[in-house]
Amino acid sequence: MRPLPRVAPLLLLPFLAASVAVGQAPDRSAPPQLGPPPSFRHAPIQRFGLSSGLEVYLLEKHEVPIAQVVLLVRSGQVDDPRGKEGLATLAAEMLTDGAGGRSALELADEIDFLGATISAAAGSHTSRVSLWTPVAKLEAAMALFADVALRPAFPEEELERRRAERLTTMLQWRDDPEDLARIAMNRELFGEGHPYGVPSIGTEASLRSISVSDLRSFHDQRYRSSDAFVVAVGDLTPDSIRPLLESAFGGWKAQKAARSAVAESQQVAERSITLIDKPGAEQTVIAIGRIGAARTTPDYDALELLNTILGGSFTSRLNRSLREEHGWTYGARSRFEYRELPGPFTAGAAVETSATDSALVEILNELAEIREPVPLDELERAKRYLALGFPREFQSIEQIAGMVSTLVAYDLPLETYNTAVDRILALDAARIQAAAEKYIDPDRVRIVLVGDRVRIEPKLAALNLGSVRNMSVDDLLGPPPVVEGSE
Amino acid sequence: MTRFVVLSLLALFAVGSARAEFSIPYEMFRLENGLTVILHEDHSVPMIAVNLSYHVGSGREKPGRTGLAHLFEHLMYEGSAHVPEGKYDEWLEAAGGENNGSTGSDDTNYWINVPSNALDLALFLESDRMGYLVESMSPARVDGQRDVVKNERRQSNENRPYGMAWIVMAEQLFPPGHPYSWDTIGSMEDLSAAAYEDVVEFFESYYGPNNASLCIAGDIDPVAVRASVERWFSDVPAGPRVAPLSPPVPFLEKEKRLVMEDEVQLPRIYMNWHTPRKFAPGDAEMDLVGSVLAGGRNSRLHKRLVYEMQIAQDISAFQYAQMYGSSFHVIATARAGHTLAEIEAAIQEEIDRLRREPPSRRELERAVNQYQAWYLAALESVGGFGGKAALMNGYYAATGNPDYFQEDLSRYLAIGPDDVRTAAAAYLRDDARFIMSIVPEGQRELAAPAAEEEK
């Protein structure tokens, strides 16, 4: 009923072209020769400090009268106290549940009335509060934005609402094989004692232990101006945005937050399989994972290129094989999730149940094959796809604000994106092979399968790929949470 | 049909008026073979968006061949006479391009984003498959994508919670034979039956240039691009004329109710009505009915069921606008321990109230302001799903005017509180709706009550 997408995602020599007679049949014997690709530089990232010491990074983009302002604080899930997992994401989410003397509904009414959007979320090492607004409404929106970021109320009844909502989300995880595979894989790779190994919204037990005073003290101690910065993008100038930011954040006293120490995780040492039973499932969700790389790794460009070839593009090896050659799946892919510490590398697909064993073997074969030298034409195609497609990432202010935030959050040079095309085009097969040998190893992976155990298990045993641990959904998630007031 | 607009992009927003008026400059012309071409300049990023719409969707499928339009869309990427299998994607990626396509009931849309030096490649690829697809089509290619599409259905429907809802909805809401009475993905049985001959016939009937429109937006020189388009599409012959469909206006003679079981934890209700087609009087009003009922935290249904009563985990209400008849949907998931009877009763009270009393001025203004902001956001990206090229091509298909942005927005600005009430009263009728409950297996007692006569 609704549209179905195909995938789950210089000048044109005017004089020459104009001289071609209309109606003359084009030469289709080979794809047309193209001129040199356009060069690309984004607008400069301007930097200035507010009187409180808060740093602001501004990128002007004047085509449409809208603006995006992001406040990023360097605290996140890694700062959740032990036993209070989910606190950082809950604190961020609840910033909009009442602030600056307004209730949650009053706040929502005022924001919606402006046609603006204010949202907040926590990641593993950072939390961000984002404002999107028509520039005409910037002043009023900025006042609300500052209240949300600096003066949240964390009302008791809102906490109870959020708790019930999250417990219900945890209940609904049981329905979705993709959710189950993700939760299982993170736990397999990082363990329940590591912040990367626990779901971002916590566990039932940790969620039940969080109180209003936990939220308030997290905000007091972790939302600190000396560990924060602002990114502003859109129809703005330093003169237009600076006074607004000054009145919003100029009085935020300079204080540093304590940094939580997080250990790097042990790399996977052998191959093992976790099979989660979903009786009767028509497809098996396959996920194969290792510990990947940090965002600041010098291997970043090489890994992005490697992943483009392996499973990061439509013509990647995984998609070409599992989808186009075998028809086992709607799409196969791989990805590195880069964080402050090495995050997960995963490869996988949802495949028809009868093809589970064949698809699993095929993905492992591709993980082995990528450690061999990549043929030149395949390498060049991937380099050009990655490098020349780069300007696309700079279409919307939301995209750009995200790109700039990443640079600042990881202390990367502000010229990083302007030099990306040259850096990528300079990579060679030896560099990719070295990265593959360092990060990819089909013999040392965690494999998670979510599917119909009776149909999968016999063929899986015959493959003899490593130890197989059978799990029910209850084994993975515990008994279904009971939501208060529902019985 | 050519229309030159001298406004520059910077003049997009008239200064000094209370409400910003915007117009998107474009040029439009038609080739001899009937292909409509729309050009729009935007030099903010050195890329070009190519958006090609064929005015055929699953609504044109024959009985026993549901899913063919979408399967066909997949086959469009498998090669044409001068583009060997696999090269469509390889050549584009090697030029730094990306692409995707989508199939709906009314239209099938193909888009490419390329760096601004690579437009000729995109036009070569699109014109080749428009002119020379069947030369390289084979039963083996059909088989290959048949398997992919079946797996798309397994992933998006069978193996996804509540994933069968829209498939059943189409069958139940629309009368048999209506172009919207089957889902675009098609039945497994029909996907198995689709043959090479069906694919060839579909191409020859619907994929002519005279049944398509091409929008090229971004970092372009319109003079040069026009010459390129004329060259690449000049050898593509026109297809047969495609007569418009004329399905009867769908209506329900009485209330229908259905209960389905699924492997889910919580029951979900779908309340569904027929509403005026896209851009017809009443369409924008129903969008605002959706906003007042469930747009944002202060909307009536969200505030009442999710925020205050806390009997629902989520709720949405929206107009799904299509060419031959729209539908309006209210969808809510119950919290554990609550039944869909409770949920339906609370929703019904809010619908009754909106049918009785107009929304407040502030409620309405809040909704309209959000629409205005959406129109600003829509002007940012040129390519991809929802980019300017896609929107302009969609506006052209629906209204004949690619720059319909201001007219579209003006519909909302003209609506008063009582118009919203009137629309709710006219279309959200108790005696002409379809109510579907999806409940956890074996828990039919959680469903919404049966229709009066079935009790």
Image: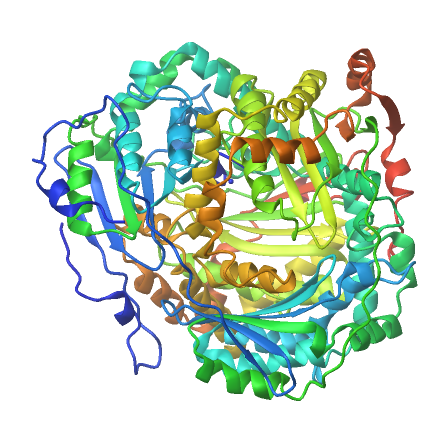
Rendered location of residue B181, percent (x, y): 48, 33
Q: Is residue A327 visible?
A: yes
Viewer-closest of B299 and A428? A428
For residue A292, which quarter of the picture?
A: top right
At x 89%, y 57%, the residue is: A206
Position of A353 with respect to B407 (left or right) is right
Rendered location of residue A386, percent (x, y): 48, 42
At x 44%, y 70%, the residue is: A66
For residue A187, which quarter of the picture?
A: top right
Position of B83 with respect to A377 (left or right) is left
Rendered location of residue A382, percent (x, y): 48, 35
Q: Residue furthest front?
A: A430
Color style of the picture: rainbow
Q: In the rendered image of this protein, does residue B393 appear above or below residue A76?
A: above
For residue B266, which quarter of the picture?
A: top right
Quadrant assignment for the C terminus of chain A? bottom right
Q: Is residue B449 visible?
A: no
Q: In the rendered image of this protein, does residue B346 appear above or below residue A256?
A: above
Rendered location of residue A182, percent (x, y): 74, 40
Position of A399 with respect to A216 (left or right) is left
Count all numbered tags in the image, as a single digit.
0
